[in-house]
Image (cartoon, rainbow, N blue to C red):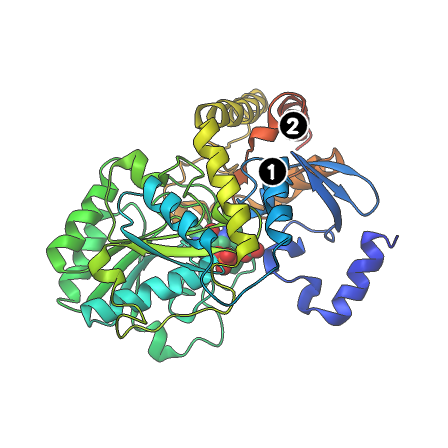
Amino acid sequence: MSTSADLFARALELIPGGVNSPVRAFRSVGGAPFFTRSAHGATLVTVEGRELIDFVGTWGPAIHGHNHPRIKAAIATALENGTSFGTPNPYEVEMAALITKFFPSIQKVRMCNSGTEATMSAIRLARGFTKRDKLIKFSGCYHGHSDSLLIKAGSGALTHGNPDSAGVPAAFAQETVVLPFNDPAALDAAFAANPGQVACVILEPYIGNVGFIQAKPGYLAHIRQACTKNGALLVFDEVMTGFRLARGGVQELEKITPDLTCLGKIIGGGLPVGAFGGRKDIMDLLAPLGPVYQAGTLSGNPLAMAAGIAALKLLDETNPYARLDTLARQLHSAVLSAASAKGLPVQVPQCGSMLSIFFTASAVTDYATAVQTDAKIFGRFFQTCLRNDVFLPPSAWETLFVSTAHEGAAISRACEVMTQAIREL
Ligand code: KE4
């Protein structure tokens, strides 16, 4: 079997940067990525046979750990009947029923194949419904890589220093108003400066793509009221937080009703799935009923639907959110106490199974404070953890994901490794 180094050398000849998604490239933390041969529970197994405790969780989907037997069995059963039909299939109806059950704000839902497609389609729908062109987003929020949203974006765009991607026409960019997160006055000013022009406000209600940042108390309610007052739609991008922080996402925790919601990650059970949904009067503008076009060859794919349905049913049966919060709090406490013993400034925002580690003295409440984190220290921390077989997201501006599979030995070992890694900084 080739080593990760052999595979990466070959990949670099064939794939830009050797990766199919930039954030996997380790460029901001140094070194070269390992290649994974298999994944089970809380563990990734590299092609060298190394077993790593994984806190990337394939960037969010693996809330039950990797390759959960229930999800694996669901895919195997679906596979007996074929991989794709190009016609409606029963799984799509079951998936739509599950999503609308857990998200009361979603009266109708359309499946697609990625979070990018979900948010791209949601803003097109918002523009079609309101007949307005402008949209408001927030610095550091990452909504996938469609042109209108790759402005001051987070995740890999921020990690690689190009939050405003090349190749986006100025004409597109000027329709996107970018504001600081957690700043109600900035939102009110933007609406005042663009009267009757804003189709929607799109946000990650808790941001996971500039590291983890929660909305301040009352902030989401303020956005809701401002959208209603100004005739703009409120779009929650819950691709990461949907089914992650609660079965009904942040909108369940904060009791806010958006007009549209975007989903992804967990609803695919590890296979490529996205979805967007919301008010029936808005969703019915979509083709084939209405004038807003949106489509997808593999949308509602039976294998992906079967995997996602198994993942969501497991969440419904086990309701693991309190357990996940307890597990993540162990990491939170371990890092905070090690850093305080060393007199090292650190912030460890955590909610449920999501947390980030910022090496900075000030509270991280928005993009401007998040970019104050010392990415070099993070890189050293990341590498020490990896040397001790704990794999964190390879970027100072991503979120760690804890799964139910981390319970027991994995979380204890990770706390030990992270404590020691802080001591060695
Ligand atoms: P995808 O197109 O990557 O499926 O989803 C885009 C997206 C949309 N909205 C939110 C809130 C997201 O977090 C994402 C994707 N998240 C990143 C992780 N920070 C994906 C990892 C990657 O780009 O490889």
Residue located beneath label 2 in the image: 414
User: CB atoms at circles 1 and 2 under 8 Å apart?
Assistant: yes
Q: Is residue 123 above or below residue 90?
A: below
Whichever of labels 1 and 2 marks the residue nearer the N terminus, that label is 1
Q: Position of residue 261 (x, y in %)?
A: 33, 52
Relative placement, left or right, of 416 versus 402 is right
Residue at x 63%, y 20% (from the top left corner):
408
Residue at x 30%, y 41% (from the top left corner):
251
| Location of residue 48 (image quadrant) | top right
Question: Quick one: 89 or 38, which is closer to the camera?
Answer: 89
Identity of the amino acid at label 2?
Answer: Ala
Q: Residue farthest to the right?
A: 1
Residue located beneath label 1 in the image: 55
Count of numbered badges drawn on the protein: 2
Question: Quick one: 392 or 281, which is closer to the camera?
Answer: 281
Identity of the amino acid at label 1?
Answer: Phe
Q: Secondary structure at mark 2?
A: helix
Q: Secondary structure at mark 1?
A: loop
